[in-house]
Image (cartoon, rainbow, N blue to C red):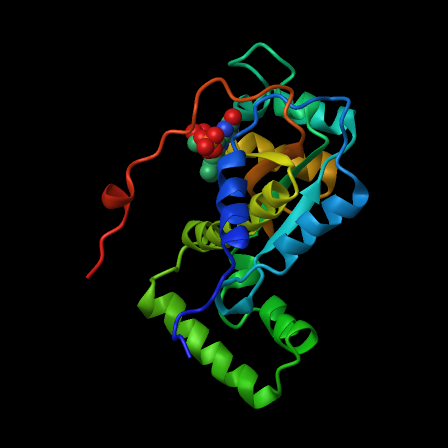
Amino acid sequence: MNAFSRTSPDIRRRIIDAFNFRHATKIFDPERKVSEEDFNVILEAGRLSPTSFGHEPFRILMIQSPEKRELLREFSWGANGMMNGSAGQLGTASHFGIILAATGALMKAGSEHLQDHYRRVKHLPEEVIEIFNAAYAKFQAEDHKIVTDREIVDWSGKQAYIVLANMMTAAALMGIDSCPMEGFDMELTSRTLTEHFGVDADKWKPAVMFAFGYRARDPESPKTRRTMEETVSWF
Ligand SMILES: Cc1cc2nc3c(=O)[nH]c(=O)nc-3n(C[C@H](O)[C@H](O)[C@H](O)COP(=O)(O)O)c2cc1C
């Protein structure tokens, strides 16, 4: 038997087509909404994403109310159409949200939150929890030196970006457009989330915003990327 897997050419083409289809959509067609069924698939792709140690250091905040979205506009230049004179992603996306990253209060080795996560979500027996606590403590203190609050929340943010990537790929496979956004003021966003969305800033910080919907028009310029040779080295 052939040692190589036999992926059908059709599947290969569909995957690459989806990646070429996806572009950072600046203006969505405000009349076209993503169906609940399709959006649930996008959320499920996020929820099922891998995370380091399986700690799931993220939450997804959906912001559908136009009034709530407007609270973000002033300091979210990457989402407000400032550069193209439109209502931007905030004003036109079918679905808009923010992925929150867990802070050190939740993600420091040995935290109460992690003990609960190991027991309730991962169903780990007590002796395995002990092993997890020790391994994760070493990972934080020695292997990756993720020690300060800033380092921990940045580590959580890395996981959040994987979640968003999976959501965008799932969307693209369904012909749904998206935009990832980090063009916003962290401090002001965090404060607004606390004041108007009930987010506990001691536990959760904004990592990245996202928008989903259907493009209002095709991108103005074709995709540009480095060549494969510039991107990948084989040894
Ligand atoms: C983490 C991240 C943050 C981004 N922030 C913004 C943003 O705030 N606003 C925006 O319009 N595009 C944003 N982009 C989109 C990029 O500019 C875009 O992906 C890149 O130029 C490549 O173009 P393409 O995605 O259309 O292929 C962001 C992309 C990533 C991955």
Q: Position of residue 131 (x, y in %)?
A: 48, 84
Q: Measured along the vertical axis of the image, is residue 196 above or below residue 153?
A: above
Q: Is residue 212 visible?
A: yes
> 222 or 84: which is nearer to us?
222
Residue positioned 54% across, 86% down in the render: 128
> 162 or 24: which is nearer to us?
24
Q: Quadrant of residue 90?
A: top right
146 vs 66, left or right, is left
Residue positioned 61% across, 75% down in the render: 118
Q: Quadrant of the N terminus?
A: bottom left
Residue positioned 41% across, 55% down in the render: 148
206 vs 38, left or right, is left
* Residue at the far bottom in the pictured view: 127
How many numbered markers are drawn?
A: 0
* Residue at the far left in the pictured view: 235
Q: Measured along the vertical axis of the image, is residue 139 above or below residue 82?
A: below
Residue positioned 43% across, 77% down in the render: 135
Q: Position of residue 203 (x, y in %)?
A: 60, 53
Q: Quadrant of residue 39?
A: top right
Q: Measured along the vertical axis of the image, is residue 106 above or below residue 174?
A: below
Q: Position of residue 167 (x, y in %)?
A: 60, 47
* Residue at the far top in the pictured view: 85
* Residue at the far front in the pictured view: 1
Q: Quadrant of the C terminus?
A: bottom left
Q: Is residue 181 visible?
A: no
Q: Position of residue 116 (x, y in %)?
A: 66, 72
